[in-house]
Image (cartoon, helix red, strand yellow):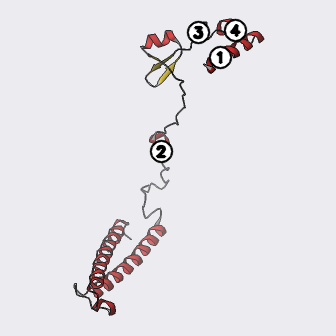
Amino acid sequence: MHSVFFRLTAAAVLGVLGLVPAAAQSPLGGGLSTQVYRCGNEYLNDAALAQSRGCQLVEGGYITVVPGTRVHRPEARALPRAAAPASGAAATPGATAQWPGRDNDARAILQDELKTAQERLAEQQRLYNNGEPEKLGPETRNHQLYLDRINELRQGINRYTSDVAGLQREIARLPAQ
């Protein structure tokens, strides 16, 4: 009720000032329609256009339309391809002709990590002692502590074994020297 009174008062004041055409002063008549039609995700207030599209009349409540964000297509964001080298060499990523220092550095780093992982694996296997590690001080009185340590050693062996295998795969992927 309050909003209808406010609309009528606002239309009357603006009409008196000459800012609104006479046809728009009445909220129910004239050029401005208070009826809103829904056409899928689109809302219209033009009755003729809404009828031509077969839209539904929306009853009750106010409608707030918030514009969405733009969706960028992946092909629009694709980076332009690098120009081919003038010498005619292959322009494949990781080619040793383009980045020999980078590949050598990567190989050296991976080999250092592989050596470290192999040393840790050997230490874990030595401590594990084929499933029968030596009992430490408190483990002689509490067998559960001993079982927990065996489980941790087994998990460490599995982890370092997978690390060694992954590092060997990465080294194999690098171009030959």
Q: Is residue 6 left or right of residue 121?
A: right
The dot on residue 118 is none
Q: Are marks 4 and 2 in contact (CB under 8 Å)?
A: no
Q: Which residue is mark 3?
A: 28
- Residue 116 in the image: above or below residue 76: below
Label 2's element? loop
The kind of residue on which mark 1 rests is Phe
The Cα atoms of the two marked residues, 4 and 2, are separated by 52 Å
- Based on the displayed image, in which of its 4 quarters is residue 64 positioned? top right
Numbered-mark total: 4
Label 4's element? loop
Q: Using a 10 Å C-alpha cutoff, classify the residue at mark 3 as few (fewer than 14 neighbours), some (14 to 19) or many (20 or more).
A: few
Q: Position of residue 150 (x, y in %)?
A: 27, 82
Q: Nearer the viewer, mark 1 or mark 2?
A: 1
Q: Name which of mark 4 and mark 3 comes first in the sequence.
A: 4
Q: Name which of mark 1 and mark 2 comes first in the sequence.
A: 1
Q: Residue at x 29, y 80 (%)?
A: 148
Q: Name which of mark 1 and mark 3 comes first in the sequence.
A: 1
Q: Which residue is mark 2?
A: 78
Q: Residue at x 45, y 63 (%)?
A: 97
Q: Residue at x 36, y 78 (%)?
A: 117
Q: Which residue is mark 1?
A: 5
